[in-house]
Image: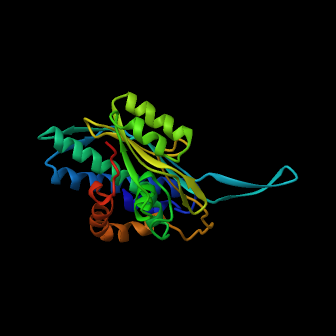
C-alpha cells in the first residue's frame, strides 16, 4: 500500500506532504511506544488519537491587497494520544506513560526536522524547551500542591502559564516547568508539562496553548520530500531512540524540587 501511494501520488503537494508527515509521526510514535512497553513489561493498544498537521500560509500584502503566500512553518499539534495500558504495577504504568509522553513531545519537532533535513533542535516543543533550559542551567521546577506557594513566585513566566499550573495543581496533578522563558530562534516562551501524578498521563504544552511542536522560518524547497527520507529514518531510528533516552529521561534534568 505504501509503495503504491509513493508511486502514484506527488509528495510535493501541500496536502500529500502533510499527510506523509502525519503517517511518519504516528509510525515513529508507535515504534517508541512498543519499545518502551517491552522495557516496562506493559501491554498497550493505541485507541483513536487526534493530531493536527499543518503548514500555515504566510501572506504578504501590498497596500492591504494579498500579493503572494508561502509556507514558512510546519506545525504538529497532537491533542489526544489515547492508549489502553495494562501494566504489572502502578509504578510501571507511570514510568511507561511518562516516557512515551516525553518521546511524543520530542517527536513533535524532531520528526519535522528529520523528514525535511533540518538540523536537530531547530524546531520547538515542550521537551525541546526543557532540554534547552537544562543546557542553559535554568532551574526546572517540579511543582506540587505542597510547594506551589513557594515555587510560583519564583517563576518568570506569563500569567497564562501560571494559570495552567494552578489549575493543574487544583486538579490533583503536578507540573514541570523551567524557572523562566527561553529564546529559541524567533520563538520566545515557556514549555511545560502538566501530569497526572497517579497514571503518568500528561499534557506537554507550549505557551499559547499548543499541545505540540513547530518549525518556523523554512524555505520553500520542493525537494524536501518526507517519503524519500523514510527509509533513512528507519535505519537511524534505533540510534535516535537511545539518544532520546539519554537526553530526556527525567534523571538527566536538573530538577529543582522545592520542599
Image quadrant holding the C terminus, namely: top left
Coloured how?
rainbow
Residue lying at the far left of the rendered structure: 88
From the viewer's perspective, is residue 13 above or below residue 90?
A: below
Q: Nearer the viewer, residue 220 or 11?
A: 220
Residue at horizontal 48%, vertical 41%?
153
Q: Quadrant of residue 3?
A: bottom left
Give the number of marks: 0
Q: Nearer the viewer, residue 136 or 248?
A: 136
Residue at horizontal 43%, vertical 66%?
114
Residue 103: % across, % down = 34, 54
Residue lying at the far right of the rendered structure: 63
Residue 195: % across, % down = 34, 39
Image quadrant holding the N terminus, namely: bottom left
Residue 214: % across, % down = 52, 55
From the viewer's perspective, is residue 177 above or below residue 82?
A: below
Residue 8: % across, % down = 48, 61
Q: Nearer the viewer, residue 174 or 256?
A: 256
Residue at horizontal 30%, vertical 60%?
252
Q: Quadrant of residue 84?
A: top left
Amino acid at each position: 500500500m505504501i509503495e503504491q501511494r509513493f508511486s502514484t501520488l506527488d509528495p510535493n503537494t501541500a496536502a500529500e506532504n502533510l499527510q506523509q508527515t502525519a503517517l511518519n509521526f504516528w509510525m515513529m510514535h508507535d515504534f517508541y511506544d512498543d519499545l518502551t512497553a517491552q522495557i516496562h513489561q506493559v501491554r498497550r493498544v493505541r485507541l483513536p488519537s487526534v493530531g493536527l498537521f499543518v503548514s500555515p500560509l504566510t501572506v504578504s500584502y501590498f497596500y492591504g491587497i494579498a500579493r503572494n503566500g508561502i509556507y514558512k512553518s510546519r506545525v504538529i499539534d497532537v491533542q489526544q494520544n489515547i492508549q489502553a495500558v495494562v501494566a504489572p504495577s502502578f509504578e510501571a504504568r507511570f514510568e511507561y506513560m511518562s516516557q512515551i509522553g516525553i518521546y511524543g513531545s520530542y517527536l513533535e519537532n524532531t520528526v519535522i526536522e528529520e523528514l525535511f533535513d533540518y538540523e536537530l533542535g531547530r524546531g520547538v516543543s515542550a521537551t525541546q524547551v526543557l532540554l534547552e533550559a537544562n543546557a542553559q542551567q535554568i532551574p526546572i521546577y517540579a511543582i506540587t500542591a505542597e510547594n506551589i506557594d513557594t515555587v510560583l513566585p519564583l517563576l518568570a513566566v506569563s500569567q497564562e502559564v501560571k494559570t495552567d499550573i494552578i489549575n493543574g495543581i487544583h486538579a490533583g496533578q503536578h507540573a514541570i516547568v523551567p524557572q523562566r522563558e527561553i529564546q529559541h530562534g524567533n520563538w520566545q516562551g515557556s514549555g511545560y508539562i502538566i501530569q497526572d501524578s497517579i497514571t503518568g498521563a500528561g499534557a506537554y504544552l507550549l505557551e499559547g496553548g499548543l499541545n505540540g511542536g513547530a518549525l518556523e522560518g523554512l524555505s520553500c524547497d520542493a525537494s524536501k520530500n518526507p517519503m524519500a527520507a523514510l527509509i533513512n529514518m528507519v535505519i537511524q531510528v534505533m540510534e535516535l531512540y537511545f539518544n532520546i533516552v539519554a537526553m530526556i529521561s527525567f534523571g538527566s534534568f536538573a530538577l529543582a524540587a522545592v520542599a
